[in-house]
Amino acid sequence: MMAGPGDTGREDMGEFALIETLFKPLAAATPAALGLGDDAAVLTPRPGRDLVFTKDAMVEGVHFLSNDDPADVARKLLRVNLSDLAAMGAVPVGYLLATFWPEGIARGWIEGFVAGLATDQAEFDIGLLGGDTVRTPGPLCLSLTAVGEVDSGRALRRNGAEAGDLIAVSGSIGDAALGLMILQGGKLPDLSAAARDYLIARYHLPKPRLALGQQITGFAHACLDISDGLIADIGHIADQSSLAAIIDWQTVPFSEAAREALAADEGLFSALLTGGDDYELAFTFPRAKAEALAAISGKAGVPLAIVGEMTGGSGVTVRGPDGHELPLATAGWRHF
């Protein structure tokens, strides 16, 4: 098993040695990185394209567990940023990385982290542009800035929803929340080994819906990725658009594993809707274009489900099978 991030007894690792031996290869195929030999990268936007920037940070004990595989930590760090690009309809260009390594971290952990980045760089055709690496008393902190591009003036926003719009979401909702509950030893109904493995994988390795984001540019009125939970994030669209949203519980898409858990414990419904870390896309679009959704789903290679509508007013309401509002223990993840 690879050494954990807090293990002591590591060999000394200087900043420039780490960059030269581990991180420089990640930039080899990215001309804008200038071989990591300078203080900054140089990007030239293509004519008629806007650059899109996003940054997410992950802290040990808050966003990942101390015994998580370092490759999974690296891949999730990159993927949650790519998910933000997807939500804007952008194509990835590159990324910047800042790492805050605790004293005593094992070199093997860093090597595993770099290997995870290399795996996903190949999958998503993206490269390292530069960054910084420093020491810290702890905990382990990681920050990544992703850069993308989109046709000028065509970036998807949260604030464009209109009254009467339908709300669609990609993939399935709530898997990551259940996966985290399993990893933290939470009380869950007895699940099959396959279901448990699936839910844990969904927590560790979200799937940024880049192809979908690019497909719905010009189709969707508003869009974001679901990081704080379905209800909280639909609430962000509602707030930014000065509208209300109604979600139909019966139409929210759940995986077979999540349905297995829900069938054994109906009380999990709140966690599924508010748990966060799904990194699916939620977007609104004109009701008149509903028939086009199947074609978009096919081109993007991801299932899409209509889960509600935007209306006048404010806030988010979840409608149960009997048409009445379902009470939720919380709206979703809060960073503070």
Image (cartoon, rainbow, N blue to C red):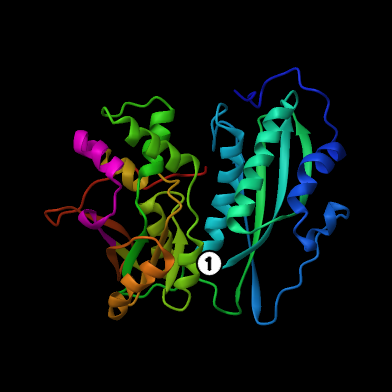
Residue visible at 29% across and 31% down in the picture: 192
Question: Residue 135 versus residue 73: which sits nearer the camera?
Answer: 73
Give the image location of residue 85, x and y in percent. Answer: 56, 62
Q: In the figure, 193 relative to 310: above or below?
A: above
Q: Amino acid at mark 1?
A: Met
Q: Quadrant of residue 246?
A: bottom left
Residue annotated with mark 1? 88
Does residue 329 show up magenta in the picture? no
Q: Is residue 204 left or right of residue 303?
A: right
Outermost residue toward the top in this view: 9
Tell me what residue is drawn at x 30 percent, y 29 percent: 188
Residue at 37%, 67% in the rendered image: 297
Q: Which sits in the foreground, 212 or 160?
A: 212
The answer to whether residue 39 is seen in the rendering is yes
Q: Position of residue 169 (x, y in %)?
A: 36, 60
Rendered-image quadrant of the N terminus = top right
Residue bounds of the magenta highlight:
246-267
In this view, the residue in front, 251 or 236, is 251
Residue 262 sits inside the magenta stretch: yes
Residue 82, x across and y down, in percent: 57, 56
Which residue shows up at 70% across the image and 34% down it? 110
Image-based side of 199 in relation to 23, left or right: left
Is 148 displayed left or right of 252 in the figure?
Answer: right
Q: Is residue 242 visible to the viewer in this orientation of the structure?
A: no
Residue 282: x and y, percent?
40, 61
> Dot 1: what SS?
loop
* Above or below, comparing residue 242 to residue 99 in the picture: below
Magenta stretch secondary structure, dominant = helix
Seen as rendered, the residue at the extreme left is 322
Tell me the crowding category of disc 1: few under 14, some 14 to 19, or many 20 or more residues within 10 angstroms, Cα based.
many
